[in-house]
Image: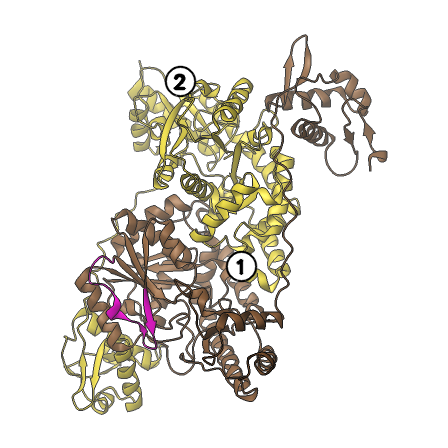
Chain colours: A yellow, B brown
Amino acid sequence: MPDSGTNSGPDLLLTLQPGNGIALRVQLETALRDGVRTGRLAAGQRLPASRVLAADLGVSRRLVVDAYTQLAAEGYLHTRTGSGTTVSLVEPSAAPPADPPAERRPPRWDLRPGTPDLAHFPRRAWRRAWLAALTAAANDDFGYPDTAGHPHLRTVLAAYLTRVRGVAATPETVLVCGGVTQGLDLLCHGMRRAGASTVALEDPGLPHRAPIIVRAGLRPRPIPVDADGLIVDALPERGIDAVLITPAHQFPTGAVLAPQRREALVAWAARTGAVIVEDDYDGEFRFDRRAIGSLQGRAPGSVVYLGSTSKTLGPGLRLGWLVGPAPLIEQLVVHKFLTDHGSATLEQLALAELIGNGGYDRHIRQSRARYKNTRAALETAIARHRLPLLLPGIPAGLQTMATLPDTCDADLFRDRAEAVGVAFDSVTRYQHTPHRTHSVVLGYGNIGTNGIDQAAGQLAELFATEFAG
Amino acid sequence: MPDSGTNSGPDLLLTLQPGNGIALRVQLETALRDGVRTGRLAAGQRLPASRVLAADLGVSRRLVVDAYTQLAAEGYLHTRTGSGTTVSLVEPSAAPPADPPAERRPPRWDLRPGTPDLAHFPRRAWRRAWLAALTAAANDDFGYPDTAGHPHLRTVLAAYLTRVRGVAATPETVLVCGGVTQGLDLLCHGMRRAGASTVALEDPGLPHRAPIIVRAGLRPRPIPVDADGLIVDALPERGIDAVLITPAHQFPTGAVLAPQRREALVAWAARTGAVIVEDDYDGEFRFDRRAIGSLQGRAPGSVVYLGSTSKTLGPGLRLGWLVGPAPLIEQLVVHKFLTDHGSATLEQLALAELIGNGGYDRHIRQSRARYKNTRAALETAIARHRLPLLLPGIPAGLQTMATLPDTCDADLFRDRAEAVGVAFDSVTRYQHTPHRTHSVVLGYGNIGTNGIDQAAGQLAELFATEFAG
């Protein structure tokens, strides 16, 4: 509203708005800076004497002198005795960014994997834990964090992982990090620094792993999986420094690494000196029986264990952990120090509190029951709508692979389904080199049983009209 | 307390403690795992039949069968029809870590720089902001974060930095990151990927910068500073891809980059195409006048701006930001995605709330008054105790350089002072190649005015007894 303000006249086109909540000094300085930056005030242009501008704007001369002095110190203006104040040569601001890309409408039924049930994030329990952590925090807890993680959380996590996932852990073998992503990134950088060059990984497998490996200067080497998990026999006897694996519940096939393969893998690692990197990404969620304990507990000298709260609580917390031999942890702490100096302290203490007061176990129990239910609803809906889908994996986790009839291409089916409001992934997304497949991945973590049935109905209709016979 | 438990007999030496709060099944599995891991249960050893062990332990046979099955699936045991259950070959756990190193006693008077006043962390305001953020959070805010930072915080930060630090920022030019450390790490990786090789930096300068640069595959190139800040004329005309600088308040000398050097630096960057990386590490705290606005606002196309809450609130929060041209931000977002997938969401929303409700400005105002006071107390104490110390820098920030008499070696003085309970740094700690100096760095961020006076008294005594004449 320029009319309600005061104007410095045609030469400067500055407008101040007294009483708009921003100090006049700040308004004047901002206006001058903007004028210089946008080029409206041209390099070399002489500014009015402070007395003149003050009168123009109806402000004190002192305020104008202050602003001129400030902008001279910042390099926007030149002040020379005798010749007044002139505009400095300032490169213009970068052009304003183009219009943001049109947002894609979220799908009506979202079966894309990777996200837990966000509507059931335990807001109340997390609030209570966080408040307890804040109240109990020492002043030093607001200082630079222990880079390996707060000792209290490391102690609590070591006990928790030992008890629930059969991990061989002590506080000295735990590194707190920003999700599995950071754990893997640090590990890859550490291995690269130690001379490693190649990391084997499951094909198909979790997304974004190969680029993390490549960014650290390592080469990814895909190894196929079958119904018994990673085909351990396909691992070369030399030239592999580490293998990244999801033994408890392979992503995306849903296979469990068979006992004989676990043994063969550990023997392979012992023989070749390679590191096994166990990504226990949803190890808490098995519905048919107790979860298989971690591979790391079986061979703590050869296995580095990665886990997080991304599936148990929510990925927005960015809380994860890496468990490995103490000398490795010491090495990775150096990398973490140079990466982000350590993880935020209060959230670490909140997680320690939540685990310690039993709230974490309780939430996982409730979530497991809910996911079991949704998974059962998916099977019911497939039967009820006579969808020609087979679910080859174990009943576990937050997603399942689903195999279509041979005649039905997964990518095509996914594209057509998306057009009718049902989103999910084709397995091609998780293949090292995408190739034709009949398998899709259905995530049921963040969709209710009603949504499941409706989505299945839509897919049945799609089959009948476009993929029949 | 083995006496109160049940024992499986000499062959297994398993002890269960009913009613100790841990399920018997978990106790049994843990005991078996530990036995196998430690080698107490040797490879090949046959375990008692489930019926026998159940009777020994006074538990149900079903429980023992379950435990055997579980550990067989995990690879600790072999179960073969007809030949019973035997122990698998498992590599022993890593040896327990050596005793932790004896903790160094914290100094009685801590004048080491780098830490703000942790006793005045605004617990109440932060709690209120965090609770408001949690209440207002959408369910999706618990999902994977926007890697560049939550759009709400980026909007609030852009406005704040424009208003308070004269930064040229829009939401599209802001990247939220885990402190300045992560911002610099991402930037170095991004520059390296784009072909950069050498980063100039201030000598003496902030600690830990050179290792971050080296870890990213770049070469650090020290450039000397004097009483007017970085000696811009010492920057080579070719072969430098970026220069890292603290223009508002050089660390550790306390110099402000002189106006003519600001211009010369911007001109140098325009000429050579190098990037200026502005670390505004304590730009909010100047006591004698308003702070100099950011260099970035002067040349937004050439300058990348780094800042954080580490000095304004506390480094334990790990909240920082990087401002740069939108195409650079897009490139760094890819690196951040592969590093940690994004920063934790709730804390971002809490900071946005704290800035938005005025609490952030208020805390900074109060802190500035407090630090100004402590800084004045330091000058008073130096005069009162007739300490032969000169403070060459401007009255700003949370530390000052202090110059000793020519006869007094800074390292020696620091060592002797530490022995009498006063800790601070010698400037040698911040030199690229440490060499003899008469300057030390006194941090007054996290010590009260009383502590200041007592420490000065101690130092005066030290001077009189050990460094006189």
Give amino acid for label 1. Leu
Indicate the chain on which mark 1 is placed: B
Q: Do discs 2 and 1 share a chain?
A: no
SS class, disc 1:
helix
SS class, disc 2:
loop
Q: Is the C-beta separation of discs 2 and 1 under 8 Å?
A: no
Q: Is B341 drawn above or below residue A42 in the view shown?
A: above
Dot 1 alpha-carbon crowd within 10 angstroms: few under 14, some 14 to 19, many 20 or more: some
* Depth check, front residue: A455 or B270: B270
The part of the image, by quadrant, that contains residue A428 is top left
Determine which of the numbered discs, if any, sits on residue A388 in the image.
2
Residue beneath disc 1:
B131
Q: Is residue B409 magenta?
A: no
Dot 2 alpha-carbon crowd within 10 angstroms: few under 14, some 14 to 19, many 20 or more: some
Q: Is residue B230 magenta?
A: yes
| The N terminus of chain A: image quadrant | bottom left
Residue B362, percent from left and from top: 47, 74
Q: Is A354 drawn above or below residue A384 in the view shown?
A: below
Q: How many marks?
A: 2
Q: Residue at x 40, y 80 (%)?
A: B394
Q: Is B279 drawn above or below residue A243 in the view shown?
A: below
Horizontal arrangement in the rendering, residue A148 relative to residue B302 (left or right)? right
Q: Residue at x 34, y 30 (%)?
A: A429
Q: Which residues are magenta?
A: B223-240
Determine which of the numbered discs, if any, sits on residue A209 in the image.
none
